[in-house]
Image (tube, rainbow, N blue to C red):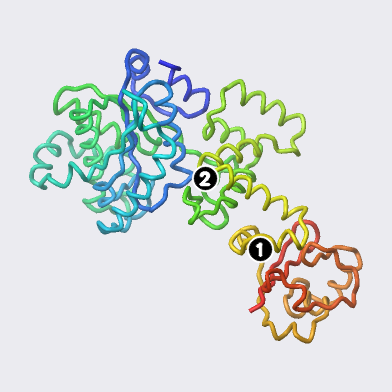
Amino acid sequence: MIKNFVEELKWRGMLHDIVPETEALLNKEMVIGYIGFDPTSDSLGVGNMVQIMTLLHFQKAGHKPIALVGGATGMVGDPSGKSAERNLLDEATLNHNLSCQKKQLEKFLDFNCGANSAEIVNNYDWFKGISFLEFIRDVGKHISVNYMLAKDSVKNRLENGMSFTEFSYQLVQGYDFYYLWKNKGVKLQMGGSDQWGNIVTGTELIRRKVSGEAYALTTPLIKKADGTKFGKSESGNVWLDKNKTSAYKFYQFWLNASDEDAKTYIRIFTLFTKDEIEALETEHEKAKHLRVLQKTLAKDITTRVHSEADYNSAVEASEILFNGTIDDLGKLNEDLFLDIFDGVPQFEMSKSELENTISIIDLLADKTKIFPSKGEARKMLQGGGVALNKSKIEDLEFKVTNQNLINQKYILIQKGKKNYFLVIIK
């Protein structure tokens, strides 16, 4: 073994629950373990990175990781952590999602390293041939209704009701574990702490059906220091697919982490050693304003998920936002330009309104309402608090024309240091 897998998870803050004797088993032999991934989207999100990193550490410790993509379970819908029934996906959508997720998983795990090479399996492959009668006879009879009702994922939903489909989900996931135990020698299932009930249903099914031994381990659910949900930005979920979350926004998500969150994230989402992380933390504490932890974290994970070129592009765009000129802004492609200013207040004007020029005060107060009155706009201009396309404007008689457009389409206005506004010319 290269390292102790459980100890590695512990110091990284990645261990929540573990079945007794699991650590002893992992220290004794190469173990085959798996984690299931939910195919409800055509991309994995940063929340899934916890489980991807778990499999990665598992493989680096000398064990064999299996990633299960849930072609069958995706048709049922996992009630764990959900307050309402999910929409079920059709087969074509599921297959598309599964294909996309497989490509992402292949970027992180080693599929060609001998005995502990990673594998990807799809539970639809074994469920498609099982009839309903077979399933309730061979699986359902081993797990009592009382046992199923005791699970938090069920108890939390009983008041508002849940369908038999979702109620049966834990049996379906339990059977996955049994099938992999029997056919692939899988002894361990891992997952997030919200999956504990489903995972131990599998260990229980293996014990009751064939008197076999199986093991379980879960990681904590990640929350931000302020208690809000991890994995979301102002514009929604943060995805690993850059067509859904651009590399720039992905980079910014990590760069904007609080100091406390950065300490948590750099342990969970990077492969830096304990000594390396502690050295980074010491360096960070000496000059917090330099954001050493955040920058190191953002570089590492953006490069691994996307590429070094995407990381460099994101850094360059960030630099332009704070220190760039109008020429720098003009060099950005439109998608990256809009990414940088995503979420800032936007106003629209017609090109004809600029043909006869417009005064800077009229633009700020009448056309855009950036300032509630011309008096306030005038006062801010005189105080040097307004920039147009990164250039400070102090001339109260300044005229805005089509010559001031970035890429023939945009005017960027800055009020103070941090308040940006985008005028889009239609």
On screen, residue 323 versus residue 111, left or right, reads right
Quadrant of res 112 = top left
User: In which quadrant is the C terminus drawn?
Assistant: bottom right
Which amino acid type corresponds to the residue marked 1 in the rendered image?
Val
Q: Give SS at disc 2.
A: loop
Q: Nearer the observer, disc 2 or disc 1? A: 2
Instruction: State the residue at coordinates (40%, 26%).
Output: 58
Residue 46 sits above or below residue 3 on the image? below
According to the picture, the residue beneath numbered tag 1 turns out to be 344
Q: CA distance from mark 2 to mark 1?
A: 25 Å
Q: Are marks 2 and 1 in contact (CB under 8 Å)?
A: no
Q: Give SS at disc 1.
A: loop
Counting from the top left corner in percent of width and height, residue 127 is at 17, 44
Quadrant of res 218 = top left
Task: State how many labels appear.
Answer: 2
Quadrant of res 56 = top left
Residue 78 sits above or below residue 179 on the image? below
Counting from the top left corner in percent of width and height, residue 319 is at 72, 50
Counting from the top left corner in percent of width and height, residue 324 is at 76, 56
Question: Which of these two is toward me, 296 or 90?
Answer: 296
According to the picture, the residue beneath numbered tag 2 turns out to be 306
Say which label, 2 or 1, has the lower sequence index.
Answer: 2
Instruction: State the residue at coordinates (26%, 48%).
Output: 71
How many C-alpha atoms fall within 10 Å of the one at disc 2: few (<14), some, or many (≥20)?
A: some
On screen, residue 192 versus residue 209, left or right, reads right
